[in-house]
């Protein structure tokens, strides 16, 4: 009997890719999502990609009665992966209460349900944003967290601490917080990918929308940073590699003897690439020049951040396999499939 996994926020970008990798690895995942940041079309796309029906529950993870119903219907849940959070840094500054309520509230509901129903395993979606501007590079898991520069980043720090305190209280939960660096790319099938609502905040979807003619030009937020080419450096991790890291984390948790466990693991490639390198690599994979201009720096941007990914290899046996070029090629294929879909 395959182990049941609840994927909270499973209709979203990283959640949907993780749903696919869970199935590939023999798990029995179910999606829980309110579709506030995902289209219902994702369900059809997942059916096409996996050639199987998709079990999903539409509702708010902050709603305890809804979560009770989901868990009651599922029966014996082996683990939960919690992606269900708002993640737009800028919006979190304008609407902090929306972020604190949703991102922290949904975790509190979940942890209460996990202890009430003896669900032992949790993989939590955290972020490199907790490190702020690191003093030393590459960033390891013992690099001190910096005071969050946005309510979004603060919710990630608070959620990590809530999980740690729960485990310390012997709540019989084994948890791993995965600190993502910069997710990008799409499933090579071109059937699922990133679907930003409105103008993308993140670099890669903005690049692909400019290349597809959806947007006129990319503005590079500053090129006079003290970096090799003056533009910011990030650790771009392919979303399929990132999805596989969740499966590895689950497998690791399942084999632990102790009943209470909490760990933090960076999920990055260990390499840094600048904005200009992303642009040049994209022009290479798309075979077309990208229309961009240099603009002012964006508030809150850190200059350089990339991971030391050794712990992921040592503890959960995971390393990234796909390159920046693979991710940009897959992101471009996905963007073009959207254009075809719209024209149908
Ligand atoms: C990357 C680089 C920009 C857009 C954010 C969140 C982080 C995580 C990943 C959730 C930066 C530059 C961008 C544009 C640009 N999300 N850029 N023009 O800010 O590193 O991280 O997403 O966990 O928490 O903070 O990603 O893609 O926005 O920016 O020049 O139109 O691209 O300045 O240097 P970021 P990003």
Image (cartoon, rainbow, N blue to C red):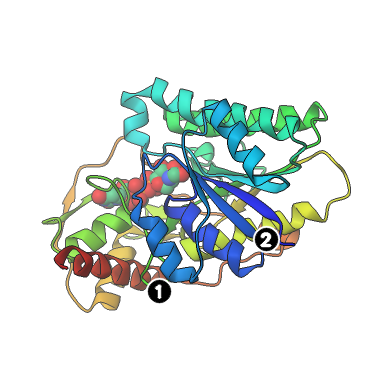
In the rendered image, residue 161, in percent from the top left (x then y), is placed at: 65, 29
In the rendered image, residue 170, in percent from the top left (x then y), is placed at: 83, 30
Tell me if label 1 and label 2 are in contact, CB under 8 Å. no
Residue at position x 70%, y 44% from top? 75
Q: Residues within 10 Å of mark 1 (few under 14, many from 20)?
A: few
Residue at position x 44%, y 70% from top? 49
Could you tell me how many numbered marks the image carries? 2
Could one spot residue 223 in this view of the protein? no
What secondary structure is marked by label 1?
Answer: loop
Look at mark 2 in the image and give the residue it sits on: 248
Left or right side of 18 for 215 = left
Look at mark 1 in the image and give the residue it sits on: 189
User: Of 233 and 106, which appears nearest the observer?
Assistant: 106
Left or right side of 36 for 2 = right
Relative vertical location of residue 121 with respect to residue 203 in this rendering, above or below: above
Left or right side of 48 for 174 = right
Residue at position x 73%, y 46% from top? 76
**Quadrant of residue 3 within the rendered picture:** bottom right
Disc 1 from disc 2: Cα separation: 22 Å
Direction top: furthest residue:
97
Q: Looking at the rendering, in which quadrant would you find the C terminus?
A: bottom left
Could one spot residue 284 in this view of the protein? yes
User: Of 336 and 10, which appears nearest the observer?
Assistant: 10
In the rendered image, residue 212, in percent from the top left (x then y), is placed at: 18, 65
User: Of 341 and 56, which appears nearest the observer?
Assistant: 56
């Amino acid at each position: 009997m395959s182990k049941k996994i609840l994927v909270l926020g499973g209709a979203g970008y990283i959640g949907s890719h993780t749903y696919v990798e869970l199935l590939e690895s023999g798990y029995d995942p179910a999606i829980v999502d309110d579709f506030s940041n995902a289209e219902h079309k994702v369900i059809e796309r997942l059916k096409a990609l996996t050639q199987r029906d998709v079990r999903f529950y539409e509702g708010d993870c902050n709603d305890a009665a809804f979560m009770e119903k989901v868990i009651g219907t599922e029966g014996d849940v082996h683990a939960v992966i919690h992606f269900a959070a708002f993640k737009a840094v800028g919006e979190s500054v304008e609407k902090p209460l929306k972020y604190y309520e949703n991102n922290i509230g949904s975790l509190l509901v979940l942890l209460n349900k996990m202890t009430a129903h003896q669900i032992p395993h949790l993989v939590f979606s955290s972020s490199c944003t907790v490190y702020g501007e690191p003093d030393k590079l590459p960033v390891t898991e013992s690099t001190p967290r910096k005071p969050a520069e946005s309510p979004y980043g603060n919710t990630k720090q608070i959620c990590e601490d809530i999980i740690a305190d729960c485990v310390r209280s012997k709540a019989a939960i084994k948890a791993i917080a995965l600190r993502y660096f910069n997710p990008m790319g799409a499933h090579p099938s071109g059937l699922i990918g990133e679907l930003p609502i409105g103008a993308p905040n993140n670099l890669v979807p903005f690049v692909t929308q400019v290349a597809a003619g959806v947007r006129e030009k990319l503005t590079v937020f500053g090129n006079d940073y003290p970096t090799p080419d003056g533009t910011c450096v990030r650790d771009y991790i392919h979303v399929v590699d990132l999805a596989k890291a969740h499966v590895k984390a689950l497998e690791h948790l399942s084999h632990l003897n102790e009943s209470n466990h909490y760990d933090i693991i960076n999920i990055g490639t260990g390499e840094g690439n600048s904005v200009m390198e992303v642009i040049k690599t994209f022009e290479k994979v798309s075979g077309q020049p990208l229309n961009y201009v240099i603009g002012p720096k964006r508030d809150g941007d850190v200059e350089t951040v990339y991971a030391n990914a050794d712990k992921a290899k040592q503890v959960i046996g995971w390393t990234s396999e796909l390159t920046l070029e693979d991710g940009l090629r897959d992101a471009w294929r996905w963007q073009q499939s959207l254009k075809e879909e719209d024209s149908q």
